[in-house]
Image (cartoon, rainbow, N blue to C red):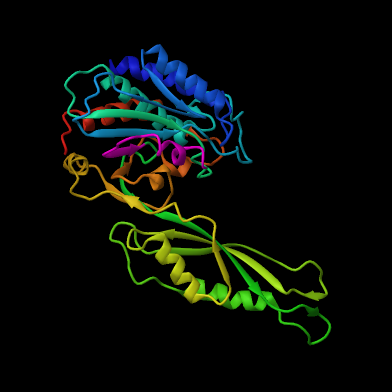
């Protein structure tokens, strides 16, 4: 059965690559996924470009496991040697945009769901979801679906992790900072240069260290990534704006981090969103213990996924390599998908938790 599911997964992946699915424009890929699941006798629920479904023999008394991955891609970067929307097989690879992130985890989790779909007497229920807008943390993806799912006790988020287990991932805050000075003529000793004031604020960010360091995720990391000021060479700018990318750990809530930054800086501080929190799972969770018993590496992930929008225990796990994501000539090895399906199935077989 796994061989048949693997063959179907490869065929499906090629169709997905050949169908552009940039974030917010995933409707055609969503239809391909719905047709594929329907062809296997699966009853679907849909909302915008999100699709989800339940195993056939659902039992409300049993815990619920969510298998989730995303259907959208980033825009192709410069440097592609191939058509990013043409699945190309070369040197044992399948090359194409989204092949690795997150096409391979998406189809592998779907195959895993189909493996268990008709089975009776499972110790758990399964929900499979293929969601939109992950790459832009959009409001019409997992953020929307989360309100539709009545109960989830545990989730596996399909992302390329080399089938190593990410037991936690850092959250994200994007902070817009505005420094106010006073305009003046650059040729005279007039005005208060907002750029110079901003440099002082930026140095505070550069040199600040948060007290609490996570054993899994390390320290909270702040990076200034954008700056903008001035409109004319001979005018001292009265306003300077800069952006801070903040990667949070589980030791602080996003609100706590925002308060610390506001107290640190002498400028206007405005977070774009507070909802992308650090996420993870207790290391004594039965799923984590089963993974560790198999000798699989567990780690804390610095990158963000739909896991940040989940309010229940979750892990990140999937075929592929995060280092290939968002790069030219992105690829996946077919054996990574086959082994991914086998590993997902082995982890869920006989998994019992309350």
**Which residue is nearer to you in this view: 142 or 8?**
142
Question: Split into 4 quadrants, where in the image is the N terminus?
Answer: top left
Residue at 41% from the left image edge and 54% from the top image edge: 171
Whether residue 335 is visible, yes or no, is: no
Q: Is residue 206 magenta?
A: no
**Which residue is nearer to you in this view: 156 or 97?**
156
Q: Is residue 147 magenta?
A: yes
| Position of residue 244 in the picture relative to residue 161 (left or right) | right
Residue at the far bottom: name it.
189
Q: Position of residue 253 (x, y in %)?
A: 37, 61
| Position of residue 195 in the picture relative to residue 2 (left or right) | right
Q: Quadrant of residue 255?
A: bottom left
Q: Position of residue 264 (x, y in %)?
A: 48, 76
Q: Position of residue 83 (x, y in %)?
A: 61, 28
Q: Is residue 352 above or below residue 274?
A: above
Q: Is residue 195 above or below residue 146?
A: below
Residue at 21% from the left image edge and 50% from the top image edge: 283
Question: Split into 4 quadrants, where in the image is the C terminus?
Answer: top left
Q: Is residue 226 above or below residue 341?
A: below
Find the magenta span and give its range: 139-157
Whether residue 255 is visible, yes or no, is: yes
């Amino acid at each position: 059965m796994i061989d048949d599911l693997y063959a179907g997964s490869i065929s499906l992946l090629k169709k997905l690559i050949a169908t552009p699915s940039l974030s917010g424009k995933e409707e055609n890929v969503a239809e391909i996924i719905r047709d594929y699941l329907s062809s296997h006798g699966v009853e679907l629920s849909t909302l915008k470009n999100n699709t989800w479904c339940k195993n056939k023999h659902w039992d409300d008394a049993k815990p619920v496991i969510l298998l989730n991955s995303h259907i959208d891609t980033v825009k192709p970067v410069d440097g592609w040697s191939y058509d990013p929307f043409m699945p190309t097989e070369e040197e044992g690879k399948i090359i194409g945009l989204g092949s690795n992130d997150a096409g391979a985890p998406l189809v592998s989790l779907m195959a895993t769901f189909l493996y268990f779909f008709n089975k009776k007497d499972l110790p758990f229920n399964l929900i499979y979801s293929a969601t939109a807008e992950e790459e832009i943390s959009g409001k019409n993806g997992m953020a929307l679906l989360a309100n539709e799912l009545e109960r989830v006790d545990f989730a596996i988020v399909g992302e390329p992790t080399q089938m190593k287990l990410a037991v936690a991932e850092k959250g994200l805050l994007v902070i817009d900072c505005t420094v106010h000075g006073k305009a003046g003529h650059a040729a005279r000793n007039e005005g208060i240069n907002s750029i110079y004031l901003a440099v002082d604020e930026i140095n505070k960010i550069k040199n600040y260290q948060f007290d609490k360091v996570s054993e899994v995720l390390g320290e909270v990391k702040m990076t200034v990534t954008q700056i903008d000021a001035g409109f004319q060479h001979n005018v001292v700018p009265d306003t300077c704006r800069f952006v801070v990318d903040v990667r949070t750990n589980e030791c602080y809530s996003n609100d706590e981090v925002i308060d610390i930054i506001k107290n640190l800086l002498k400028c206007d501080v405005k977070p774009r969103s507070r909802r992308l929190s650090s996420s993870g799972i207790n290391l004594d969770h039965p799923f984590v213990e089963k993974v560790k018993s198999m000798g699989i590496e567990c780690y804390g992930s610095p990158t963000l996924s739909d896991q940040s929008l989940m309010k229940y225990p979750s892990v990140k796990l999937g075929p592929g390599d995060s280092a290939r994501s968002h790069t030219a000539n992105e690829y996946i090895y077919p054996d990574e998908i086959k082994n991914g399906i086998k590993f997902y199935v082995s982890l869920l077989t006989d998994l019992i938790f309350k």
